[in-house]
Amino acid sequence: MQILTAAEFGVPAAILMENAGAAVARFCLRHYAAAERVTVLCGKGNNGGDGMVAARVLAEAGVAVEVVLLGREDEVKGEAAEALARLKEAGVAVREVVDEAGLAEVRGAIGSAELLIDAVVGTGFKPPLRGVAADVRELVAGMDVPVVAVDLPSGWDADSMEQRAEGAYRADAVVTFTRPKLAHVFGHMAGSARAGSARAGSGKAGRASGPVVVAEIGTPDAAVVSESGLHWAGSAKAISEVPRDVNANKGKYGHVLVVGGSYGTAGAPSMASLAAMRTGAGLVTAAVPKSVVGMVAGIAPELMMAALKEGPEGAVSLANLDGIEELIRAKKITVVAVGPGLSTRGEASEFARALVTRVKLPMVADADGLNAFEGRSAELNGEGRVLVLTPHPGEMARLAGMTIREVEADRVGLARRFATEHRLTLVLKGWRTLVAHPDGRVAVNTSGNPAMAKGGSGDILTGIVAAMLAQYGEDAARAVEAAVCLHGLAGDCCVRGNSGLAQAMDEHTVLATDTVTHLTDAFRYRVRDGDGLTWICGMNGEEA
């Protein structure tokens, strides 16, 4: 993403800096309220200027603030120099550090602080850090004090799509401006055990992602140009936040048909069906082999059932095709989900391929509904319909005829190519699940956590996607993005008891069905908080 210069749109850069610094200060006052002594590390550029504004606003709020300037005051230019002048007028102490000789004083300033603000360098800086900035980074790394980064953790390349950034400052929270950059959505940028300490005031313990928030500072929308074709999936969640019409009835919210299961695999279609019901589909029917009908039906009394003929290996028989199509017409099915627990035994794969090809309703294919197309992906065509595939990297490798390593080496490029070539929507699961659309746009999801690395999570997602398509089929792209976001948020609610939304679970103990239990918290959660900050990562504890 590129943000054009303020001058091109008549917005003074000094105003943007003032708004940016004030946003950082508000975040610190709200989320680190117990911090009475704050040290702000400032560089000589505009990022440092943002930090100086934040320092002044904090001081005006009664916080004891000290500024450490990595450089000389006479080297600070432009709007940052104006911010420095106003800072000194407010009586805030500024300590210059120009070489290693000043590091001892920096150590003291950091050691006595209850909160650090990292405003050394931001967007536009290309790694690596050198000189005193690198030396101070090592000091910060060894200190037990929370760090709030301004724009980016210093030393992190804004255009990076890597999960980690060697040589960058650590951060417990990040406040950026206008729009997230690539690094904000792809990087594991913030979060550590330090943020859970009493000194942090309020933070999230454990290894889950810490807050990465975006503040609007007055940059015109026209000044923001996306060159990557990427956007944040969380923005689509808004479609799930519109209250239902008071004259609602189940017929308005679609009828999902889940086709799957085989002898010994009743759990997968059960979980997909349960998730579809909990996500708001008006009606859900599970079509499974007759030998597992009783087990699947036991998941919820609201679930309707259809028994399928079985082949000799307990898998779905190809003879079911005509019956499935008649079921779709009779029950007025609006969305089909195929694959959970289907198996690849007997005629199951041939059945899955025929179903995907013949039925033109909106369809979600997962698990063995995808494995059925191994070596035959040319048969997948979403032209003129809504076809959603939800592979994990292993399934994607089989579909694309490559190794998992090759899939992971170019996730965005592969997802975009596959989606555009096959005219379908591809949900490539993993770290930062991607939603690639037929037109080449790709959404990046930032919700979710390692607790969701459990069997059944994919089945739950299948049900959520199908239910969202059933309700919001007129905006299928956003429906799928919102589904992926909601699934991750439900997982986050499982392990974020201190968010105020749910009782915390340890990440080891979370089951896939626990995310279904917490879907109500995910729906109620708002990514935009009362201060106007949009939470890209982490959870703000606010709900509708």
Image (cartoon, rainbow, N blue to C red):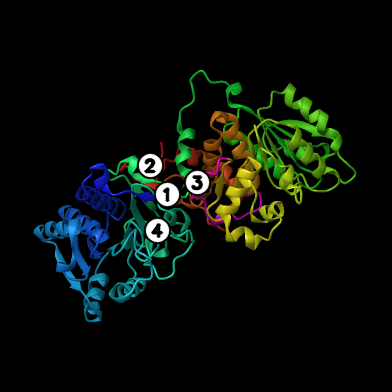
Question: N-terminal of the two: label 2 or label 3?
Answer: 3
Image x and y of residue 358, in percent:
76, 33
Find the distance from the CA under tag 2 to the CA under tag 4. 22 Å
**Which secondary structure, mark 2?**
loop
Say whether marks 1 and 3 touch (CB < 8 Å). no
**Which secondary structure, mark 3?**
helix
Question: N-terminal of the two: label 2 or label 1?
Answer: 2
Please tell me which residue lies in front, 404 or 498.
404
Residue 528: which disc?
Answer: 2
Say whether marks 2 and 3 touch (CB < 8 Å). no
Find the distance from the CA under tag 2 to the CA under tag 3. 14 Å
Image x and y of residue 223, in percent:
33, 44
Label 4 sits on residue? 158
Question: N-terminal of the two: label 1 or label 4?
Answer: 4
Q: Main SS of the magenta segment?
A: loop
Residue drawn where x is 80% and y is 44% of the image: 349
Find the distance from the CA under tag 3 to the CA under tag 4. 25 Å
Image x and y of residue 125, in percent:
34, 63
Residue 536: which disc?
Answer: 1
What amino acid type is highlighted by mark number 3?
A: Leu
Label 3 sits on residue? 489
- Residue furthest to the right in view is 312
Q: Nearer the viewer, mark 1 or mark 4?
A: 4
Question: N-terminal of the two: label 3 or label 4?
Answer: 4
Residue drawn where x is 42% and y is 51% of the image: 498
**Which secondary structure, mark 4?**
loop
Question: N-terminal of the two: label 1 or label 3?
Answer: 3
Lateral position of residue 443 relative to residue 134, left or right: right
Give the magenta-colored segment's residue range: 439-457
